[in-house]
Image (tube, rainbow, N blue to C red):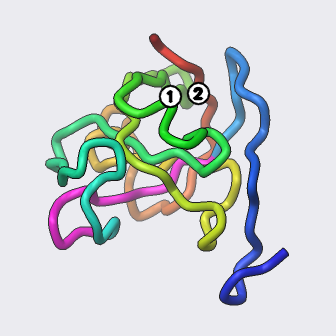
Amino acid sequence: MGCGGHKTYSCSPPISAHTKAILTYNNFEKGGDGGDPSECDGKFHSDHDLVVALSTGWYNGGSRCKKKIRIMHKGKSVEATVVDECDSMQGCKNNIVDGSPAVWKALGLNKDIGEVPVTWTMAD
């Protein structure tokens, strides 16, 4: 199925204690990459906030809004709050954790890498 030339997804892989995902970089500030305010709270978020957007299936119609997830990469981990959806019907892959600059920094990652394989699980 496609939409605007992008492959689309209506579901994501099941969540486990070590769900495989791709971490992408997103600026949740006004004028940032995300564009609109976050779906969960209608607000923009500072680059210093530990926040993420999840692919449509994982976002699950907003049921994970304001819940914390733990993201792990090469022995480091960080807890971040779900504030938005990475819309898998608009070009976002079905296995994306879209992290703020603070998430990337906490994991010791360079944002210029663009995409990094990680694992994640619900933290609360």
Residue 121: percent from left, percent from top:
59, 21
The magenta-colored residue range is: 22-32
User: Decide: marks 1, 2 in contact (CB < 8 A)?
Assistant: yes
Q: Please, which residue is most extreme toward the right here?
A: 1
Label placed on residue 71? 1
Query: Does 31 sit above or below residue 68?
Result: below
Amino acid at pointer 1: Ile
Total marks shown come to: 2
Relative to 63, 13 lies left or right: right
Q: Residue at x 76, y 74 (%)?
A: 7
Amino acid at pointer 2: Trp
Q: Residue at x 37, y 58 (%)?
A: 26
Residue behind mark 2: 120
The overriding secondary structure of the stretch rendered in magenta is: loop
SS of the residue at dot 1?
Answer: strand
Name the image quarter holding the C terminus. Answer: top left
